[in-house]
Image (cartoon, grey):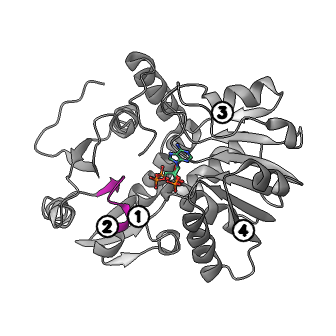
Amino acid sequence: MGMLPDAGTGLLALIGWPVAHSLSPVMHNAGFRRLGWNLCYLAFAVPPEPGEVAAAVKGLRALGSRGFNVTVPHKEAVAKLVDELDHSATQVGAVNTVAVRQGSLVGYNTDGLGFIASLKEQGFDPKGHSVLVFGAGGAARGVVAAMVQAGVRRVVVANRSPDKAQRLVEDVRSFQPLAEIQAVPLEYACVVRQAQGVTLVINTTSVGLNPEDPPVWTDFSIFDSRSLVVDLIYHSETTPFLALANEAGFRTMNGLGMLVHQAALSWQVWFGEPGPVDVFYDAARSALRERGSGADHKRKE
Ligand code: ATR
């Protein structure tokens, strides 16, 4: 314990903008400490201006980093900068984990499988389920692609901007032509019409990061009572969306499991073995407790 960096310390990193609230450094460093590995994980705020991400990626390679994570808004840019893309990243066109192997950069995406792992940890195998997803941004893309891969029966994507949902649906169909997936506007009547048979409901929007936000959806009476209701937000145990679902008697899950499992799968990419999930949970929960649950805590990693 208490190992300090020395001349032999290996560097892992996160690049994003902003990164100040990221829980990745506390999780990964707690894991390294637990295993007694001489590694250090640092978060770097890399501005979104053209050329900056490319310089950061080149710099990490030149500095001999074993690998790094990538977060908003650089996931798509890094997918174009790596030497090779793993299939986990090609379909979403976004990279959250890079391995440096003999100076060559290989891009992966562990967000989607991290999400699936967090569902399974709750005893929920999404295979065969019908899913309603609120939101069509980067987070939605990752989880939808992973769920289609995992064999869900049907996906409905409800988004405020319907064109964005339509684009997501078309992109998924381009690699999974048989996927039963459709886009609808996030309007009461449109969502109600699609609710039949849904057994997994997921909020991927940022609505609820501010606890004063009205929930993205309020009428849970339209869903099958056996449904699992998920919010990808993790800065607090519950969100306005999950609180309503709970009151209505549903099983619920926040986004902490996805955060922890994407980190564990990053270890798989870097070290060939998954990270210690229990250590990551403890580190993330104690960091969240220390911070309190302010509204400025982004869920992004
Ligand atoms: P992320 O990586 O979190 O997915 P994003 O790509 O910016 O971030 O996407 C944010 C998502 O939250 C989008 O689906 C967005 O809807 P629009 O496509 O219509 O912008 C959704 N969102 C954000 N604020 C919202 C609000 N007040 N009501 C409904 N949806 C909202």
Closer to the camera in the image, 287 or 192: 192
Closer to the camera in the image, 232 or 257: 232
Q: Residue at x 40, y 56 (%)?
A: 271
Q: Quadrant of residue 180?
A: bottom right
Whether residue 118 sits left or right of residue 103 in the image: it is right
What whole-number distance in Å separates the C-alpha atoms at marks 2 and 1? 6 Å
Residue 115 visible at all? yes
Indicate the secondary structure of the residue bearing disc 1: loop
- Asked if the residues shown at circle 3 and circle 4 are in contact, with their CB atoms under 8 angstroms apart, the answer is no
Indicate the secondary structure of the residue bearing disc 3: helix
Specify the amino acid type for callout 3.
Phe
Q: Is residue 206 above or below residue 212?
A: below
- Asked if the residues shown at circle 2 and circle 1 are in contact, with their CB atoms under 8 angstroms apart, the answer is yes
Residue at numbered disc 1: 95
- Asked if the residues shown at circle 3 and circle 1 are in contact, with their CB atoms under 8 angstroms apart, the answer is no
The answer to which of marks 4 and 2 sits earlier in the sequence is: 2
What whole-number distance in Å separates the C-alpha atoms at marks 3 and 4? 23 Å
What whole-number distance in Å separates the C-alpha atoms at marks 4 and 2? 29 Å
The quadrant the N terminus occupies is top left
Residue 260 drawn at (x, y percent): 51, 41
What whole-number distance in Å separates the C-alpha atoms at marks 2 and 3? 32 Å
Residue at numbered disc 4: 182
Residue at numbered disc 2: 78
Residue numbers of the magenta segment: 67-77
- Asked if the residues shown at circle 4 and circle 1 are in contact, with their CB atoms under 8 angstroms apart, the answer is no
Question: Which mark lies nearer to you, 4 or 1?
Answer: 4
Indicate the secondary structure of the residue bearing disc 4: strand
Q: Residue at x 57, y 68 (%)?
A: 163
Q: Is residue 154 magenta?
A: no
Question: Which mark lies nearer to you, 2 or 3?
Answer: 3
The answer to which of marks 3 and 1 sits earlier in the sequence is: 1
Whether residue 171 sits left or right of residue 218 in the image: it is left
